[in-house]
Image: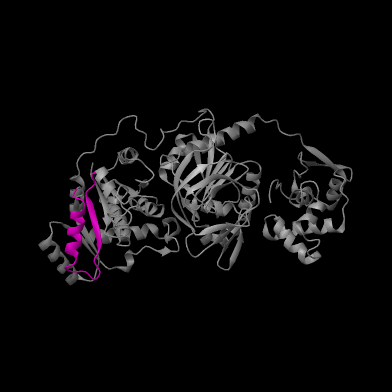
Amino acid sequence: MARFLVSAAHKSSGKTTVSIGLCAALTARGLKVQAFKKGPDYIDPMWLGQASGRPCFNLDPYLMTAEQISASFVRFSAQADIRLVEGNKGLYDGLALDGSNSNAALAHLLDLPVVLVLDARGMTRGIAPLILGYQAFDARIRIAGVILNQLGGSRHEAKLRAVIEHYTNVTVLGAIAHDPQLALVERHLGLMPNQECDDAAQHVQTIGQRMAEQVDLDKIIALAQSAPALPEPPVNTPVGAFPVPTPTVASQPLRLGILRDKAFGFYYPDDLLALQAAGAELVSVNALQDSALPAVDGLFIGGGFPEVFMPELQANAALRSNMRSAIEAGLPVYAECGGLMYLARTLRWKDSVVDMVGALPVDVLMHERPVGRGYVTLQTTPDAPWLTAEAPAGQTLRGHEFHYSSLENVAPGLKFAYKVLRGHGVDGARDGVVYRNVLASYAHLRTGAGSDWANQFVNFVRRQKMADQTQVPAAPRTVLVNGQPVATDVEGYLKNLDDWSEDFVRAQAAAESLELTEAHWQIIQFLRAYYEEHRVQAQVRAMIQHFTQVWGPELGNNHHLHALFPIGGPQKQGNRLAGLLKTKGEH
């Protein structure tokens, strides 16, 4: 099994660019290259997958056992000609003092020859003790060669090669000149994802061509083929912490929507495979372009960069409104980080504030520095929505977080699925906002790496679908408007919003024994105007802000608004009379 690890002496040495270039160059030679990435990461694997034409899988010594890593490595690379593992940070870096979760530990576990990428800027003779030290630090690790990066020219390269040949027994596999064209675009959270770059394919091809010109690919292939055979994992060894899931009811296919576009793209390929293995058909949704959700039984919104696409996300009011209505109607949703931000009321970054879906009674504020980053340990609370007899409250889950945002204006009494034992989450103590059938958290989970979330979520969606199918639909009702029946649902919401009229308001108010005043009409007109302008319904805080200015603080407050609309409050009764969509439960 031909394989090798690309690592470095320290982070920012260029190993990601080298790894992408090697994947592209070896693929261009006609080899089937399977890429892996050490640790929790979304963006590097996306670029590696672009370069190899195959999904890149993560190997995480902190979240996965050695048996799980070995099984994943063997399973996902079975059809490949050569396997490339990109490390993170430096070769010997890791959380544990003993190095048990370092890149070197992964190299030892999988018996990977190591290619060390060295940023050689400003170095000549000093490169020898660096290499010798890395070789001597752990004799179990085979540093099979080095790639010199960021060279200043042919003279610099010649000096380095002479030094390495004289003082060490390490092969120089390549020498890469400083070249701005090889750089990958970075911004506030690291590399820009490939799906945001219109020229990603061309850029990867260019990096591959430069790598083929400056790295000895034949030597790379030879050292990869020198790796000894790996023992086959036992037949009953699960790839992750749990066996491959099977659908609870095989005859009940599920359609699971998944947001995949420039704003949302952080998904682990093995998680998507686990969702499919659990019986879900994955249906792509574009938050920037689609005007409505397709026919789906549940929705998965992964992480991403919604803050970068604030204007586009706000402009697609039709999808946001449709999604909010679906959530109010009970659609099961799982959202991580960027997905949580998207489901909030508003998103504020720098001087801009935009409306988001508005399904969750929270607002999001972006900061200049990370709020939460690193691994997390969570414990499920009794409010976690996916609990079963086999998976009761109190489970300990492991995952990771990396967010620059925090929540503000959190509604009192909001429920949370997780108690945070390690990490930050929403507020250092809680994570996993629960609203109706939504679970939205800052934590990223991985099936088979400290969590069985994919199987649990699909089975939760299935239970909700089966419950909906067995429910007897509520009988519709009618309101007589000028002697003509107008259809509403059982709660009084119009079946056809085009049937709204001021006479409908009077008839509906009479049916509810509500005496309409000028104040009621002002609120109804405000609600309709707000919706026409923003294409989303006004939250109570927007109503309070407006009517405090119009009526003064004595009357423009939450208590007075609720006194005017005693059946469900201004967010329910007011919107119902205004002929807007059902917003039951919104705050």
- Asked if residue 153 shows in the view, the reply is yes
Residue drawn 69% across the image and 46% down it: 585
At 76% from the left and 46% from the top, the residue drawn is: 568
Between 453 and 421, which is closer to the camera in this rendering?
Answer: 421
Displayed quadrant of residue 191: bottom left
Q: Which residues are magenta?
A: 111-139
Which residue is nearer to you in this view: 287 or 444?
444
Q: Is residue 470 magenta?
A: no
Image position, residue 204 (x, y; %): 34, 58
121 inside magenta stretch? yes
Asked if 291 appears above or below 475 in the picture, the reply is: below
Q: How many marks?
A: 0
Identify the residue at image location x=81%, y=48%. 566
* Relative to 270, residue 150 above or below: below
Using residue 42 as the reference point, say whether residue 140 is left or right of it.
left
Q: Left of 344 or right of it: where is 136?
A: left
> Which x, y percent locates residue 30?
26, 48
Say above or below: 358 vs 257.
below
Residue 81 appears in the picture as rendered: no
The quarter of the image holding the N terminus is: top left
Q: How was the colour assigned to the protein in this rendering? A: one colour
Residue 332 x, y percent position in the rendering: 58, 41
Q: Position of residue 222 (x, y in %)?
A: 18, 49
> In the displayed structure, does residue 218 sit left or right of residue 374?
left
**Residue visible at 48% across and 63% down?**
369
Q: Residue furthest left?
A: 166
